Image (tube, helix red, strand yellow):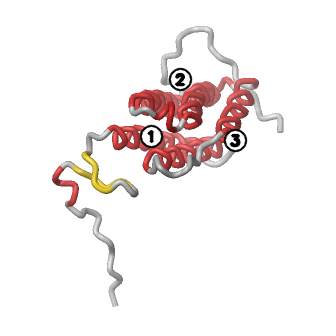
Amino acid sequence: MAESKPPVSTRRGDDGTTTLLGSGRLRKDDLRIAVLGEVDEASSFLGLARAEAGEGELGDVILDTQRLLYRIMGDVAMPKEPNTVGEDDLRRVEERLEEWRSRTELPREFVVPGESRLGALLDVARSVVRRAERALVAAGYVEAHPQAVRAVNRLSDLLYILARAADGRSTPSRG
């Protein structure tokens, strides 16, 4: 007996609306939908970077960052639910930022992305994360999800450092 596969296209969005968890139908130009799209795009670019990084410490940091972005998307999608992104997440991002900063040489001049393929992918992800941050602010999430906004702000800094590390400016892990 052939197994039934769910449809890929429901055609329900042909009218310019989409379904958002617990919110019913929303217009596709709703600010929440825009925020979700920006965060999803950042995670997708990080997926490209993770595929390039392969297994290892850098790949693990990128995967953890993608998981945080998905949790941020959950907070945005379900604003009436308790936030899942909190102080512990912010602290974790800040600790990683300091750890990688301590072992990565930062250039003194403006960086033109492209020194390495992985570094360039991380720079694209960083710029998309910054766009996602602007979308979070525009949609009013500074008040609703302050830790998520702060975490995204720190993530862009972390991705800058990781890009420089990928460009060959870091020393091996000390732990």
Instruction: Quote the CA–CA distance across marks 1 and 3.
Output: 20 Å
Q: Position of residue 33 (x, y in %)?
A: 34, 43
State which mark lies toward you, 1 or 3. 3
Q: Pick whichever of labels 1 and 2 is earlier in the sequence.
A: 1
Q: In this view, does 64 lie to the left or right of 129?
A: right
* Spot occupied by residue 63 in the image (x, y as percentages of width and height): 59, 47
Residue 153 in the image: x percent, y percent? 55, 28
Q: What residue type is labelled 1?
A: Val
Q: Residues within 10 Å of mark 2 (few under 14, many from 20)?
A: some
Q: Is residue 161 above or below residue 81?
A: above
Marks 1/2 in contact by CB < 8 Å: the verdict is: no
Mark with earlier residue (3, 2): 3
Q: Name the residue under label 3.
A: 88
Mark 3 vs mark 2: in front: 3
Res 115 label: 2
Left/right placement of residue 135 relative to residue 108 reads left
Q: Residue 10 lies in what quarter of the image?
A: bottom left
Q: Which residue is drawn at 48% across and 43% down?
A: 43
Contact between marks 1 and 3 (CB within 8 A): the answer is: no
Give me the C-alpha separation between circle 1 and circle 2.
25 Å
**How would you rate the neighbour count of disc 3 (Cα within 10 Å): few for under 14, some for 14-19, many for 20 or more?**
few
- Which amino acid does the dot numbered 2 rest on? Glu
Quadrant holding the C terminus: top right
Taking 136 as reference, is 107 left or right?
A: right
- Tell me which amino acid carries mark 3: Asp
According to the picture, the residue beneath numbered tag 1 turns out to be 39
Tell me: residue 157, above or below residue 82.
Answer: above
What secondary structure is marked by label 2? loop
Camera-side residue of 174 and 66:
66
The residue drawn where x is 37% and y is 41% is: 32
At numbered mark 3, what does the secondary structure look like: helix, strand or loop? helix
